[in-house]
Amino acid sequence: MKAKTTRLCLLFILLCSLPVFYSCSDEADDFYLFEYWEVMLNPEPPISEASLSITGGTKLGIKGGVAPYTAEIADGQIATAYVDENNDIRISSLKLGSTSLMVKDADGRIIKIGLKVVNGKQSFSVNSVEARIIGIDESLLNEQQKEKLEAVIEKIKDEADIQATGGIAFSYDQKSSGKVTIVTGKENTPEIEGSFSRSTSESGTTFQITINGKEYDCKFKLPERPDTSKSITTRDLGPIPYWLVEDVTEDYKSDVTGLFGINATSLKIERIYIGSFTPLR
C-alpha cells in the first residue's frame, strides 16, 4: 500500500511539472523580428511579410533568442545593417533594389527575410511666401527709404517660383537623391521637373535642386516659437510650420545696393516659403 501511494505521488509530481517544462521550452523558442510603431502592442507581433519594404531606413526589434546578435545584408550595395547597443537592428538604404536580411543569435538560430528598398516620398506644401533682407539697419532709414525697401521685399515675394497652394514633391531613387516635381500654384503654369540631392546638419535639411541646369540651394528649417514655456508641449501649441529658405542674394542684391549704397558683402537676402513638410515615407 505504501509503495502504491509513493508511485501515485511521483506520478502526480511529474504531471504537475510538465506544463512548466513546456512553458520554458516555448519561451526559448521565441525568436523573431518586429517593427516599431507609434503605438506598440504587447507582445509585439512578428513581421509577417516575406519581404519588408523600406525607404530611407528603419529600425527593427528582436524578440527572444540569445544575445549577442548579428545582422547581415546579402547585398551591401543596396542596404547596410547593424545591431545597436539596445539590440535593435538599424537598417540604412543605399539604392533601390531587392536583397535579404539575416539575423543570427548566439545559439546559431537564424531569421532571414527579404528586404526591398523602394522609392521614398516627401513633400512640402506652401501656405505663404515671405522675404527678409539681412544687413540693413532699418532704424537708420527715412520713410521714403523704408517704402523702397518694402517694394523690393514685395518684388521678391511676387517673383517666387512657388506661390500659396503650390508645393514640392521629392521622389527618392537613392538614399539622398532623386527626382523633384514643383507645383507653382500659379494659373496656367505647368509643373516643373528636375533632380535633387539632400544633406542634413544641425541647422536643418538642405536640398540642392537642379532644374534645366540651374542649381538652387533650399534649406528646410523648423522655426523656434518665441516666448514658449518649457512646460508647454508641441502638441499644446498645435501644428508647427516649416520654413523653406531660399538664398536669393545674387538675384536681388543690385536692387538693394542701388537704393541704399551699402556694401554687398554684408548683405543677405532670403525668400522664405512657409508651409508643412511631410516625413519621408
Image: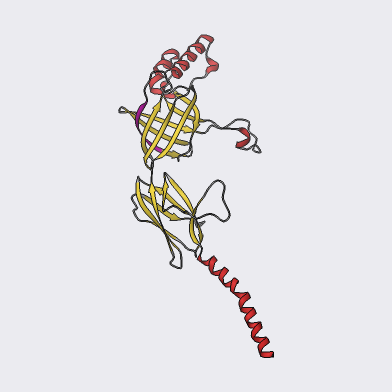
In the depicted structure, whether residue 274 falls above or below residue 121: above
Viewport quadrant of the N terminus: bottom right
Q: Residue at x 65, y 35 (%)?
A: 229
Q: Position of residue 165 (x, y in %)?
A: 47, 24
Residue 54 lies in the magenta-colored region: no
Q: Residue furthest left?
A: 213
In the depicted structure, whether residue 133 falls above or below residue 210: above
Residue 192 lies in the magenta-colored region: yes
Q: Position of residue 17 (x, y in %)?
A: 61, 75
Q: Is residue 142 left or right of residue 254?
A: right
The one of 212 and 147 positioned closer to us in this rendering: 212
The one of 156 and 61 positioned closer to us in this rendering: 61
Q: Is residue 214 left or right of residue 45?
A: left
In the depicted structure, whether residue 134 falls above or below residue 8: above
Number of numbered tags placed on the structure image: 0
The dominant secondary structure in magenta is: strand
What colour-coding does the image apply?
A: secondary structure
The stretch in magenta equals: 191-198
Viewport quadrant of the C terminus: top left
Q: Position of residue 118 (x, y in %)?
A: 38, 44
Which quadrant holds residue 166? top left
Q: Position of residue 102 (x, y in %)?
A: 40, 58
Q: Residue at x 51, y 50 (%)?
A: 36
